[in-house]
Image: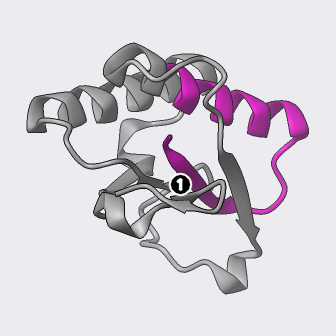
Amino acid sequence: MPLVNVIMLRGKSQDYKKTVLDCIHQGLVDSIGIEDWDRFQRISEYDRDDFEFPSFKSDAFMIIEMKLFPGRTGEQKAGLIEKITGNLSSSLAIDPSDVFILIDEPPLENWGMGGKQKG
């Protein structure tokens, strides 16, 4: 059950944003085998004044934060990062240097679903 937050500049079209989410989801399906229905994603958009990043990055720059259940190997995480970045590059021509991905794995005891602690 990955929880995904994409941080980007405001102003992209609805189709662009949907494609971003689809690229991320397909990367999760292909690389770590989540179920196709398992989509918990959101986009947080910011005005240029409220989103600071290096001047050598383009307006396509984004930060993708993912919270995953613990247990994936380093190889699986590397594959996930490569797959998502490749999907964004091929689908939206986003330069790989404009994709910043952070994977966080809180312990299962920190997850609650349906009123129950996961761990």
Three-letter code, disc 1: Phe
**Residue picked out by circle 1:** 61
The residue positioned 54% from the left and 80% from the top of the image is 52
Residue 48 spot, x, y in % from top left: 70, 76
Can you tell which quarter of the image residue 92 is in?
top right
Position of 47 relative to 27 (above/below): below
- Camera-nearest residue between 74 and 68: 68
The residue positioned 32% from the left and 30% from the top of the image is 80
Can you tell which quarter of the image residue 103 is in?
bottom left
Residue 89 can be seen, yes or no? yes
**Mark 1 neighbour class, 10 Å CA radius: few under 14, some 14 to 19, many 20 or more:** many
> What coloring was used for the rendering?
one colour
Residue 113 spot, x, y in % from top left: 59, 55
Residue 93 can be seen, yes or no? no
The residue positioned 44% from the left and 27% from the top of the image is 28
Residue 95 spot, x, y in % from top left: 44, 36
The residue positioned 12% from the left and 35% from the top of the image is 73
**Residue, far front:** 116
Residue 66 spot, x, y in % from top left: 44, 52
Asked whether 94 falls inside the magenta stretch, the response is: no
Position of 117 relative to 46 (above/below): above
Left or right of 32, for residue 25:
right
Which stretch is magenta? 1-26
Tag 1, which secondary structure? loop
Left or right of 6, for residue 110:
left
- Camera-nearest residue between 23 and 53: 23
Position of 3 relative to 104 (above/below): above
Quarter of the rendering occupied by the C terminus: bottom left
Left or right of 15, for residue 94:
left
Asked whether 17 falls inside the magenta stretch, the response is: yes
**Residue, far right:** 14
